[in-house]
Image: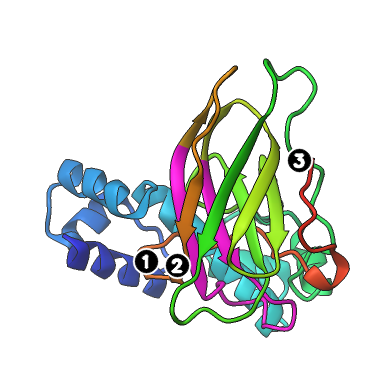
Amino acid sequence: MHDAVERVIRMMHENLGEPITVDDMARTAMFSKFHFTRRFQEITGVSPRRFLSALRLAEAKRLLLATSLSVTEISIQVGYSSVGTFSSRFKSSVGLAPTEFRRSGGFMQQLPRCGRRPGMPGPATVIRGRIWPSSLVNDDPIFVGMFPGHIPEGVPAAYTIVERPGPFVLRNVPQGVWCLLALSAAPDRPADGEPPFVGVYGPITVRNGTIAKPADVRLRPMRITDPPVLMAPLDTRFSQLTETAS
């Protein structure tokens, strides 16, 4: 089934500007629609439609940095009929409007304030853990964030940046069900590609009065079945390493 899912993802990459239905994907996978949808989500962590949407936005990020195409032209090229809808979804997922993303070279200098917000029930929780390196991992800083799903997008519920693999602490994690994602990131690496290493842990359920067990994450090279990273990377040249947002 992994081969079938990879085949569908390659088909998505080749047809980002075209309308693609789940029926189209299931035919490419050569499975029933129900079986394909269930197995796709088990393997990638997200639904086929959500994965396709993420690929389109990831390609838009690349085009903004690698070409001089206008935002309208890019929105059409990645399958949007409305530039307003494209711009809104891009900003929601990436954290910057398309023009801001292009102007900044693909980096955010500072993430919006995250963590427990006023009105959220119960106390926040501290999540501790350790990042284990891949045998191929380099010395890049590592972003560790808590997200509602398997796609790193929008404002994380909590995050920290560590200089190297090892222990980490996430403070002020609000109640909810979160996926912990670790991403290697370097400010001097071209921002139009995905981080080369990723680690996933979860889901983690944070409830009032519970003490979360340690979250140990091993970095590995990204796979074709990993959803793309949509959140614009934080430029660590403008951030204090090991500082945890709260």
Q: Are marks 1 and 3 in contact (CB under 8 Å)?
A: no
Residue 80 versus residue 101: which sits nearer the camera?
101
Q: Is residue 12 above or below residue 188?
A: above
Q: Quadrant of residue 181?
A: bottom right
- Give the structural element (helix, strand or loop) at label 3: loop
Q: Nearer the viewer, residue 112 or 240?
A: 240
Q: Are marks 2 and 3 in contact (CB under 8 Å)?
A: no
At horizontal 33% and vertical 66% (from top left) the residue drawn is 9
Find the distance from the CA under tag 2 to the CA under tag 1. Answer: 6 Å
Kindly identify the residue that appears in the image at 50 percent across and 43 percent down. 149
Q: Amino acid at mark 3?
A: Cys
Query: Measured along the vertical axis of the image, is residue 169 above or below residue 80?
Result: above
Q: Position of residue 214 (x, y in %)?
A: 51, 43
Q: Residues in magenta?
A: 179-203
Q: Which mark is residue 16?
A: 2
Mark 2 burial class by Cα count in 10 Å: few <14, some 14-19, many 20+:
many
In the image, is 130 to the left or to the right of 91? left
Q: Amino acid at mark 1?
A: Met
Res 148 label: none
